């Protein structure tokens, strides 16, 4: 019997790739969409109005929750901060409200963020460490607490993803133009750590979590690279110079406001827990990963 996955946030950068990966593994995939469409495999919903086309919900065996407004897209006004939280927390609560209409639901896995431990220190964080007190940490805390509401009906996992790398999306897309022009550089001190993961590895991680029903929180990244090493590796993969001075922190804070912490801050963490589950990264170093992305 074919098992069915429901992806919330399935039209995004990660969701599109994950949908293909799950289908290749023999799963039926439905995506939740705010847009009405007659295309197969889509379920229309409006989490703000708490409405949904529920005719296929009884088929759902697994939920993958990737939903959430883009954190880096707009300046963090107080209104925007509430949007960032609501787009994750309220939508997850609505999914939980729908669970009684999914009598065959047997597993729930959600995206989460590695930036949940607060400002970078010398501590190498593991999953049992407390949340930080900054805004990004609080988003993750509320997001994960909402996901844990599913734990009374099925196993729950939360994958605390690092920066996701792929050719046509995420950070690589934002960096590509200045780096191809030979204008790439490190940011701030260049010493802050960037936990990162290739999109292919992240999608395999979601697929394996469904297969083996992992439970709890997992730091989901391949390596923590310094900002300098990260940027230099991308320039080298593109065969472009890397001689520009570091972008000053003050300049970024002026341009981006509070969002600058996403580039100027860092996180040291351990991925031993996910590795202990038997997960093997296909993309292990930042140098080989960028070479792979550029050559594709």
Image (spheres, rainbow, N blue to C red):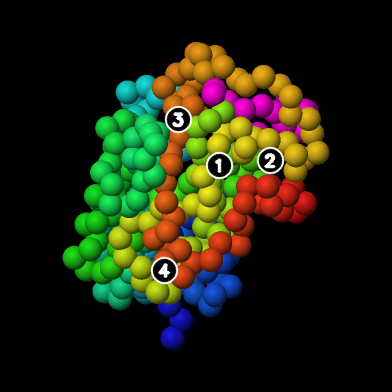
Magenta portion: prevailing SS class: loop
Q: Mark 3 points at which residue?
A: 265
SS for callout 2: helix
State yes or no: residue 142 in magenta.
no
| Label 4 vs 1, first from the N-terminus | 1
Cα distance between the residues tagged 2 and 1: 10 Å
Extreme-bottom residue of the structure: 1
If you read the primary sequence from the N terminus, does the residue marked by circle 2 or circle 1 appear first?
1
Q: What residue is disc 4 on?
A: 277
Gap between marks 4 and 1, in whole Å? Answer: 23 Å
Which residue carries the number 1 mark?
Answer: 225
Q: In this view, does 215 lie to the left or right of 291?
A: left
Mark 1 or mark 3, which has the lower sequence index? 1
Residue for point 34% across, 35% down = 118
Mark carried by residue 170: none
Depicted 277 relative to depicted 162: above or below: below
CB under 8 Å between discs 4 and 2 = no
Residue assigned mark 2: 233
């Amino acid at each position: 019997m074919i098992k069915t996955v429901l992806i919330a946030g399935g039209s995004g950068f990660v969701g599109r790739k994950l949908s293909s990966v799950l289908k290749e593994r023999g799963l039926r995939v439905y995506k939740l969409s705010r847009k009405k469409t007659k295309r197969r495999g889509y379920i229309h919903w409006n989490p703000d109005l708490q409405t949904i086309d529920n005719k296929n919900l009884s088929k759902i065996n697994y939920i993958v929750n990737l939903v959430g407004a883009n954190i880096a897209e707009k300046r963090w006004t107080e209104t925007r901060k509430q949007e960032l939280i609501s787009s994750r927390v309220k939508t997850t609560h609505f999914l939980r409200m729908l669970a009684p209409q999914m009598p065959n639901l047997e597993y729930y896995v959600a995206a989460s963020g590695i930036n949940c431990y607060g400002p970078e220190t010398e501590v190498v964080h593991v999953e049992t460490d407390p949340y930080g007190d900054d805004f990004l940490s609080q988003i993750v805390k509320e997001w994960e607490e909402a996901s844990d509401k599913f734990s009374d009906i099925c196993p729950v996992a939360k994958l605390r993803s690092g920066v996701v790398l792929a050719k046509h999306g995420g950070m690589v897309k934002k960096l590509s133009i200045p780096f191809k022009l030979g204008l790439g550089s490190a940011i701030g001190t260049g010493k802050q750590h960037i936990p990162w993961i290739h999109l292919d590895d992240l999608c395999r991680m979601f697929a394996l979590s469904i297969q083996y029903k992992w439970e709890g929180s997992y730091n989901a990244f391949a390596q923590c690279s310094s900002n300098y090493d990260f940027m230099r590796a991308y320039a080298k993969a593109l065969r472009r110079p890397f001689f520009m001075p570091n972008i000053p922190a003050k300049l970024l804070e002026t341009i981006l406001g509070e969002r600058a912490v996403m580039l100027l801050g860092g996180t040291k963490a351990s991925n031993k827990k996910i590795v202990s589950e038997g997960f093997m990264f296909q993309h292990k170093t930042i140098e080989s990963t960028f070479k792979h992305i550029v050559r594709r």
